[in-house]
Amino acid sequence: MTSVLRALDLSVTLGNNTILDELNLDIEAEQLTTLIGPNGAGKSTLFAALSGDIQPTRGQAMLRGRPVRSYRSNELALQRAVLPQDHLVRFSYSVEEIVALARLSHQADEVKDHEIVEESLVAAEMEHMRRRDVQTLSGGEMTRTAFARVLAQATPVVLLDEPTAALDLRHQESVLRQARRLRDEGACVVVVLHDLNLASAFSDRVIMLHDGRVVADGRPAEVFTRERIGLVYRQNVLVTSHPTRDCPMIVTVD
């Protein structure tokens, strides 16, 4: 395994509030790493720092040995693709046009670009909507369009912030299977999830955050314990074995 993303003494402070507190992490290629934690734990802030979207107050977010914010925008677009929570598009582009924008950072190759866009639309199950104006899409359809754009960008690092939030059950599974395929092809995949059972089923590694700090880091079976979830989420749960998948299953109880 090769360390691709690093957080070095990473802290983010907004006003008098410490959002992240001296985090140190190494995130590897060929793994699907999931960030979890309750609301306000610092997941999306860590995600934004690792992607280069925000400047840490202290410390550094590193990508392949360089501060991520030292990359020029065109360099960064070839290294990492980001699926943000907000997919709003204010222009009347078609689904296919939005996905094709991901190829602008690559050297132009009409045939290859067309093939990759087509494969990405199919993988996101949006090929039948390729001509639709994105402003007419539902929230879930827009999420799948944005995910297809991430796939078409074809980068070695893929960052997905709550990619299942607007999706139905089948498409949640489909998107995370595609994320795992990217991992199998050698990518470093980082996902923010709220659904602990999805995190358990699809992650190689789970990083649990609470109050801006890492409180657990390891395989799902190591991280998801009844005591830890109860403490961090303030919710009583039963942790048992999934009946068909080799992973823990979390069930809420009164």
Image: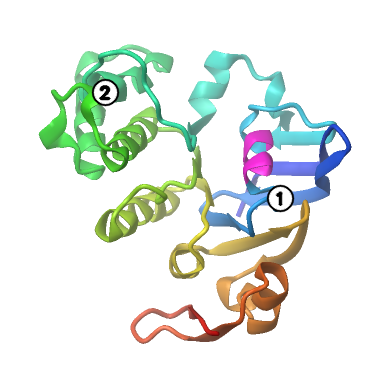
What's the magenta bit mostly, secondary-structure-wise? helix
Q: Circle 1: is it few (<14), some (14-19), or many (20+) Cα within 10 Å?
A: few
Residue at 63% x, 83% y: name it.
226
The answer to whether any part of residue 69 appears in the image is: yes
Dot placed on the residue nearer the N-terminal end, 1 or 2: 1
Kindly identify the amino acid type of the residue bearing the numbered disc 2. Gln
Secondary structure beneath dot 2 equals helix
Residue at 51% x, 67% y: name it.
196
Quadrant of the rendered image containing residue 214? bottom right
Q: Position of residue 139 (x, y in %)?
A: 32, 39
Please determine whether, in this image, residue 91 is positioned above or below residue 245.
above
Q: State the quadrant of the C terminus.
A: bottom right
The answer to whether any part of residue 9 appears in the image is: no
Q: State the quadrant of the N terminus.
A: bottom right
Query: Which residue carries the number 2 mark?
Result: 135
Please determine whether, in this image, residue 204 is positioned above or below residue 92.
below
Depth check, front residue: 15 or 43: 15
Query: Which residue carries the number 1 mark?
Result: 26
Which residues lie in the magenta part? 44-49
Please determine whether, in this image, residue 153 is positioned above or below residue 2.
above
